[in-house]
Image (cartoon, helix red, strand yellow):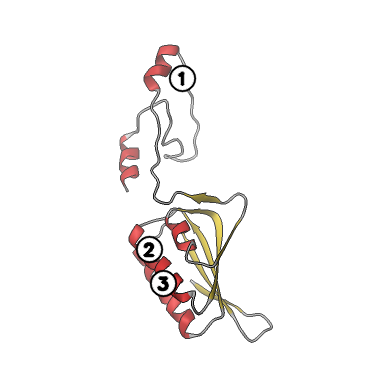
Amino acid sequence: MLRLFKPRFRKQIARIEINGAIAGATRKRVLEALKTIEERKFPALLLRIDSPGGTVGDSQEIYSALRKLQEKVKIIASFGNISASGGVYIGMGAQHIVANPGTITGSIGVILRGNNLERLLEKVGVSFKVIKSGPYKDILAFDRELTDPEKIFSKS
């Protein structure tokens, strides 16, 4: 969504929000907004990112468009609760990035690895009780194998 701040000055600052997973619809919306910003000659863009990431190709296209726009517009990326993977990739297209101390940031091109110590823990008599608020909150628990839904989730 493209929003405009209307300060008491003549010039306006554009704002684009990227929320949730980054995919084709996000790419299309953001690229159209960037084109509008360039056509209307905004002096600055605040890019608000709150995303766990998404597809590489879509993130890469947004990043490339931001790098091109940098020649004409000052771009500031602001990370919300999370900016991981494609969210960080897109943010790198800005001249400056700001984030809160509690923002979850990172995971570009990395693998997520877990160890399964289930058999060892059984031998020494250690077990765990888990209370979780979502189905994947303990996806890499070291005391069990991945469940079938977790295996499918990890491939997406």
Q: Nearer the viewer, residue 152 or 57?
A: 57
SS for callout 3? helix
**Vertical order, 130 against 37 (above or below):** above
Task: Give amino acid for label 3.
Answer: Ala
Residue under the point 42% across and 25% down? 143
Which label belongs to residue 127?
A: 1
Mark 3 crowdedness (10 Å alpha carbons): few <14, some 14-19, many ≥20: some
Whether tag 1 and tag 2 are in contact, CB under 8 A, the answer is: no
Which label belongs to residue 57?
A: none
Q: Nearer the viewer, residue 85 or 137?
A: 85
**Vertical order, 2 against 63 (above or below):** below
Foreground disc of the pair 1, 2: 2
SS for callout 1? loop
CA separation in Å, label 1 and label 2? 43 Å
Residue sitting farthest toward the right: 8
Task: Give amino acid for label 2.
Answer: Gln
CA separation in Å, label 3 and label 1? 51 Å
Task: Give amino acid for label 1.
Answer: Ser
What residue does disc 2 label?
Answer: 60
Residue under the point 39% across and 56% down? 54
The image shows residue 28 at horizontal and vertical percentages of 37, 70
For marks 2 and 3 on the same chain, the one whose residue lies earlier in the sequence? 2
Residue sitting farthest toward the front: 71
- The picture quadrant where one finds residue 114 is top left
CA separation in Å, label 2 and label 3? 9 Å
SS for callout 2? helix
Q: Nearer the viewer, residue 36 or 148?
A: 36
Mark 1 crowdedness (10 Å alpha carbons): few <14, some 14-19, many ≥20: few
Foreground disc of the pair 3, 1: 3
What residue does disc 3 label?
Answer: 65
The image shows residue 48 at horizontal and vertical percentages of 54, 64
